[in-house]
Image (tube, rainbow, N blue to C red):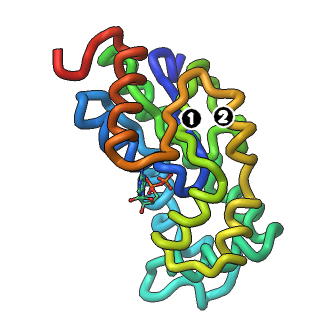
């Protein structure tokens, strides 16, 4: 069975999942990155994306990810159609990668931004990387150069971060600065492995 030694890592958009994963990777944890899997699959499905949404979303065989993101965050039905195309394929690939990790033993992390939204992964232990909604919004605007309204639309497309926080088995609080995030990652690493990162 897949996901035997897996721990899911999730959170909200721009709550700091990628930054936390980079730190946890430095401590030696193995990470399966669902976003990277999704990006690969999106490009492999470029023809299907062109057929679903129009040729203007594909140029030279490559999906225009920014244009597609603008579309799906302003059009719920388009988002659902894209998810119906990609999620089963992403799920299948992540399961295959997790079986390889299970053979090596555990624990390992599966970074799944929409873990709670998809409900598709039978992983029992979950790390939530948390930042309050206002902090998420500010970091999202800074990272992507979005307007306030665009950032709101992306936040509204997800389960609220406070709800995810309540469901967490392990919480990485990323409300503060990067030094504080590092401490939070160390603490959770210790909880997961029963070791200090520098032992
Ligand atoms: P996610 O992967 O959850 O979408 P990221 O890890 O990309 O989020 O973080 C969102 C943005 O906020 C990035 O530009 C990142 O560099 C920045 N960031 C993350 N954590 C902090 C922090 N503690 N202080 C300041 N900036 C941060």
Q: Which element is circle 2 on?
A: helix
- The quadrant of the image that shows the C terminus is top left
Q: Quadrant of residue 73?
A: bottom right
Q: Is mark 2 within 8 Å of ligand 1?
A: no
Mark 1 surroundings within 10 Å by alpha-carbon count, few (fewer than 14), some (14 through 19), many (20 or more): many
- Residue in the foreground of this view, choosing between 183 and 99: 183
- Residue 67 on image: x %, y %: 58, 82
Q: Looking at this view, name the residue that lies furthest to the right.
A: 77
Residue at figure coordinates x 48%, y 72% from the top left = 142
Q: Residue at x 39, y 18 (%)?
A: 107
Residue at image position (59%, 23%) is 123
- Which residue in the protein does label 1 denote? 128
* Residue 133 horizontal/vertical position (percent): 66, 54
Disc 1 within 8 angstroms of ligand 1 (CB): no
Mark 1 and mark 2 in contact? Answer it, CB < 8 Å.
Answer: yes
- 196 or 21, which is in the foreground? 196
Q: Find residue 142 and name its label.
A: none
Q: Residue 116 location, x and y as percent?
A: 69, 38
Q: Residue at x 54, y 42 (%)?
A: 112
Does dot 1 land on a helix, a strand or a loop?
A: strand
Mark 2 residue crowding within 10 angstroms, few (<14) / some (14–19) / many (20+): many
**Relative vertical location of residue 139 with respect to residue 110 in this rendering, above or below:** below
- Whichever of labels 1 and 2 marks the residue nearer the N terminus, that label is 1
Quadrant of res 53: bottom right
Is 87 left, or right, of 156 in this rendering?
A: left
Which quarter is ligand 1 in?
Answer: bottom left
Task: Give coordinates of residue 96: x percent, y percent.
Answer: 46, 33
Q: Which residue is mark 2?
A: 165
Q: Disc 1 and disc 2: Cα gap in Å?
A: 6 Å
Q: Is residue 31 above or below residue 19?
A: above
């Amino acid at each position: 069975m897949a996901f035997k030694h897996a721990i899911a890592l999730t959170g909200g958009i721009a709550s700091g999942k990628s930054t936390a994963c980079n730190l946890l990777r430095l401590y030696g944890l193995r990470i399966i990155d669902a976003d990277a899997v999704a990006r690969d699959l999106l490009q492999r499905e470029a023809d299907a994306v062109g057929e679903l949404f129009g040729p203007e979303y594909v140029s030279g065989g490559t999906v225009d990810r920014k244009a597609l993101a603008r579309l799906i965050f302003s059009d719920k039905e388009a988002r659902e159609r894209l998810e119906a195309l990609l999620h089963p394929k992403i799920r299948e690939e992540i399961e295959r990668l997790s079986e390889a990790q299970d053979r090596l033993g555990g624990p390992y992390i599966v970074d799944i931004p929409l873990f709670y939204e998809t409900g598709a992964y039978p992983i029992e232990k979950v790390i939530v990387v948390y930042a309050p909604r206002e902090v998420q919004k500010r970091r999202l605007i800074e990272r992507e150069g979005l307007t306030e309204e665009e950032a709101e639309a992306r936040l509204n497309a997800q389960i609220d971060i406070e709800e995810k926080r309540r469901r967490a088995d392990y919480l990485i609080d990323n409300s503060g600065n990067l030094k504080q995030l590092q401490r939070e990652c160390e603490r959770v690493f210790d909880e997961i492995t029963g070791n200090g990162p520098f032992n």
